[in-house]
Image (tube, helix red, strand yellow):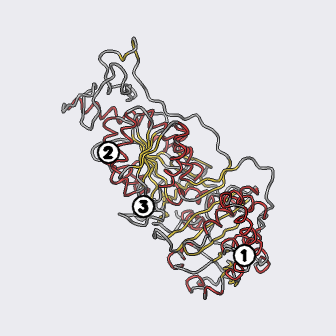
Amino acid sequence: MALNSVSLALTGSGGAGVMTSGQVLVDAAAKAGWYGLMARSLGPQIRGGESAALLRLSPEPVQSMDDCYDLMLAVDWGNIERFASEIPLTSKSIIVTDPAQGEVPEIMRRNNPIIVEIPLKEIAKSVEGGRINMVALGLVAKVIGLPEDYCIEVLSKALAKKGPEALEKSIAGMRAGAEYADKLTGVPTLDAPRTDHGERWSITGNEATGLGALRGGVRFVAAYPITPATEVLEYMAPNLPKLGGALVQAEDELASINMAIGGSFGGVPSLTATSGPGLALMTESIGLSVASETPVVIINVQRGGPSTGIPTKSEQVDLNIAINGLHGDAPHLVTAPTSIADSLFTAQWTVYLSEAMQAPAIVLTDQAMGQARAIIDKPADLAFVGQRRKPELVSGAVEDGYQRYAVTNDGVSPMAIPGMKGGEYTADGLEHSPRGTPSTQAQHHQEQLDKRERKLKTFDYGDHWADIEGDGEIAIITWGSVTEQVREAIDRIAETKGLTVKLIALRLLSPALPEKMTEALKGVKKALIVEQSHSKQYTLMLKAHYDLPPVYDTLHRPGPLAIRPHEIVTALDALVAKS
């Protein structure tokens, strides 16, 4: 069915407080029984500059932005041209502007939106200690039908440390803004908030990733802050000690990955988090993890590239380096969550895979998913906890002749923990014999290469390798943060045209599983591949490893412009028309 939702954009210069207002709206919506999604659009400035809180609220679960925005409230017009294209408007969209901030820029008038002038600054001045963002909050909440009580409940918690006076002033500002709600008509209204819902979580993709890693057993983290991955570390830093773990802020990415590998060698499931530039620096040491068969998890929150690129914008462009960026034949794991909610499961599952196979694993999320906040139903507790295979003890010691890299049927060898009597071995980047002694013998190299490849290819990944939904002769193949837009497009085309479309969203990107993909594509005659990259990295990866249907198209473009559901529907229409 068509999703009953309202899409909002709150914009202003850094410090205007639009992010705070957006945060209160989405959290209050959750308490009211609605679902919500809030994305952030920021400039590259360390302080100040343009910013926008982009929201979508609905009585039904939602993790994708809509085609356009119903209401845009501009606190000011500072640098709006830098992200105007990220806020698509139509002739039915409403722009709320303060006449004191000047004319609405021409770039925002292109599609003739409805413009309503409300003196936000003047209203704020009429309230003692009033702030424009609280006026905006009250106005928007009233217009969309979000009860005031829920906003006050969220503000009470957020302003607890500032005392009751700060809360009273914020409430007064809200109420002053709400008085102007009757000036706005035509904004979509949502079904009444539910009061019988179960527990809801307000969580970002980065927070969900951190929680998933903790649930998977990670107890040591070493990392260097980098946009947009820093929030993973900010979440884990206070929570690791509660579980007996620790986080170290290293001096750079090279130190980070090496510390994480060292922690893992010592027997503690370990992790680092970074973005594209940091991942590039880590590749040699990830190779050390492959050669020494030391498990480690690398969270890579993708951003626009190459080089420093666009740090605050999203793009699915680290796929090539994640899969192919290591020198030599270096099989390793690459996974990717399919939504904000799925970030928790994928991180937990990835830790489990890394520990079970004693292999490095890269988790590819991105800015659009990592820094966005969603209201989700409380996730279930899952039993995926990493367990390493350890050597058998005989009379309190490892059996004589311990072979750390013993050639086994499944490719996984028992891994002794430092301090185990008789479990000493050499672990470095040199090729080695089964005992771990450095070796240049062709036989040793061949058998260790085979073993490292075999453990990844023969492992039972179950059904978690991909999200496969629906059926039919047409499929959309996608990955990562684009998956939710694809899901909505599939729902729309089913409702409007009665067409059933199959979804295949890969969670396991490497190793490739051709047999499973062949099974997933049974009966599929046409496919649309959807990805957020300029050079079709995902499409080329699929072509390299899988037999695609005889007819397929690709919908792709670089960031920061998100791919919208209506574009996917249009691309599907074009694919259906192909003979």
Q: Is residue 32 visible?
A: yes
- Please name the amino acid that badge 1 sits on: Glu
**Farthest residue, direction top:** 395
The residue furthest left is: 440
Q: Which residue is mark 1?
A: 128
Classify mark 1: residues with Cα within 10 Å, few (<14), some (14-19) or many (20+).
few
Which residue type carries mark 2?
A: Ser
Q: Is residue 570 left or right of residue 402?
A: right
Give coordinates of residue 523: x percent, y percent.
55, 48
Element type where label 2 sits in the image? helix
Q: Which of pointers 1 and 3 indicates the residue nearer the eye?
A: 1
Q: CA distance from mark 1 to mark 3?
A: 55 Å
Tag nearer the camera, 3 or 2: 2
Please determine whether, in this image, residue 16 is positioned above or below residue 224: below
Residue annotated with mark 2: 285
Amino acid type at circle 3 is Lys
For disc 3, the marked residue is: 536
Q: Is 303 drawn above or below residue 447 in the view shown?
A: below
Distance from the alpha carbon under mark 2 to that under mark 1? 57 Å
Residue name at image x 64 percent, y 44 percent: 379
Q: Is residue 503 above or below residue 303?
A: above
Is residue 481 in view from this perspective? no
Please tell me whether mark 1 sits on a helix, a strand or a loop: loop
Element type where label 3 sits in the image:
loop
At x 44%, y 50%, the residue is: 273
